[in-house]
Amino acid sequence: MEIKWLKAFIVAAEYENFRKASEVLYVTQPAVTNYVKRLEAYLQVELFVREGKAVVISAAGMRFLPIAKSIVAEYERGLATFDSWKQGYEKQLTIAAAPQIASSILPVMLKDFMQQAPGIEVLIHVVNSYEVIEEIAKGQADIGLTRTFTPQASLTCAVAFEEPVVFVVPSEADEEQEAALLQKYRLITHNHPVYWDDLLLEVNRFYPAVKTLKVNQIEVTKRFIEQGLGVSYLPYSMIEKELQAGTLKIIAPDNIALPISQTYIVTKVVTPEVAVFTQFLQEIDAVNYD
C-alpha cells in the first residue's frame, strides 16, 4: 500500500469526483483512477460505488476513510520530525497567534527565543483570534497567543503581556485636543476584539455627537488613519513601526480613560517545549518588543 494511493482516495472521497481530485493533487484523472483501483485491490473491497461517470463513496469507503487519514497524518508527522532532526532540531513547538500579534510583537520576540533555545523548531499558525482557542483545544498547536479568551475547562490561560491603549491620529493632524480631533475625524471602532463596547460608552459619555466607522482589522484601521479617514484607540505595540516612520502619531486624551490591552497565553498540555517558552515569557516585558 502506497501513500499516494491513500491521498488519492482521501481527496476523491472528499469531492466524490475523480476529475476534481486530479486537479487538487496535480495529477491526471487516469492516475487518480489507477491509484484508487490499486488501493481497492489491496484492501479487496470497493471504496466507491460507480454510477456511470459519477462516483459515490461506499460503506466500506466510509469505514476506511478515517483510517486512511490517520495513516497519512502519521506518515507526514514522521517525515516532518525526521526533517527537523536533519536540521539539528531536537524538539518542536507550534504557536497559534492572532494576526495583530503575529505582525507586531511576535517577530522580535521569536528572534530572541530562538537564540535562547536553538534546539526547538518553532512553527507559526496565524489564525483569527477565535480560532486560536480552537487550535489549542484540538491539539493542533501547543501555545496560543491571543487578545481575547473564552474560558474552557480543559485549557489554561494566563496574561502574558499588558500594554496601554493609545489615541492614534494621522500624522498630518494639526489639532492637539481630543474633542477637536473627534469632531473633525470619524472614530474607527471594533478593530480590537475586547475593549470597544466599554470604550464606546466612555466616548459617547463625553462626545455624544461623534461619528464612527466600524473596521474589524487593525492593519486596515492603520491604513485608514494614515489616509486621514479617521482616528482610533489602539494598543501601543500595534502602531510602533508607524510611529517610527512618522505616518501616525499619538495624542494624549483629555477625557477618555484608556483601557489596558492584554495578550493571553493559552495552553492545554505543558510539554517541556511549552514550559521553556512560558518561562521565556515570564522573564521578559512586552515593552521590550515595542
Image (cartoon, helix red, strand yellow):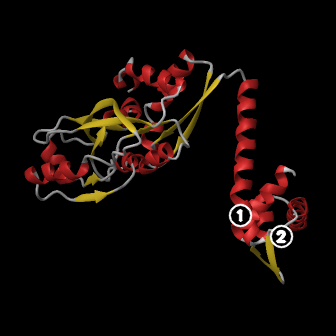
Q: Quadrant of the C terminus?
A: top left
Mark 1–mark 2 distance (CA, rounded to whole Å):
11 Å
Among the two numbered marks 1 and 2 on one chain, the one whose residue lies closer to the N terminus: 2
What residue is disc 2 on?
46
Residue nearest the viewer, comparing 154 with 54 = 154
- The secondary structure type at the circle numbered 1 is helix
**Lateral position of residue 208 relative to residue 8, left or right:** left
Q: Residue at x 36, y 33 (%)?
A: 237
**Lateral position of residue 218 relative to residue 95, left or right:** left
Residue 164 in sight: yes
Q: Residue at x 19, y 39 (%)?
A: 258
Residue 103 in sight: no
The image shows a total of numbered marks equal to 2
Type of amino acid at the residue the image marks with label 2:
Glu
Q: Which mark is residue 160?
A: none
Residue nearest the viewer, comparing 192 with 146 = 146
What residue is disc 1 on?
63
- Discs 1, 2 touching: Cβ within 8 Å: no
Quarter of the rendering containing residue 146: top left
Q: Residues within 10 Å of mark 2 (few under 14, many from 20)?
A: some
Type of amino acid at the residue the image marks with label 1:
Arg
**Lateral position of residue 202 relative to residue 234, left or right:** left
Quarter of the rendering containing residue 265: top left
- The secondary structure type at the circle numbered 2 is loop
Residue nearest the viewer, comparing 220 with 48 = 48
Q: Residues within 10 Å of mark 1 (few under 14, many from 20)?
A: few
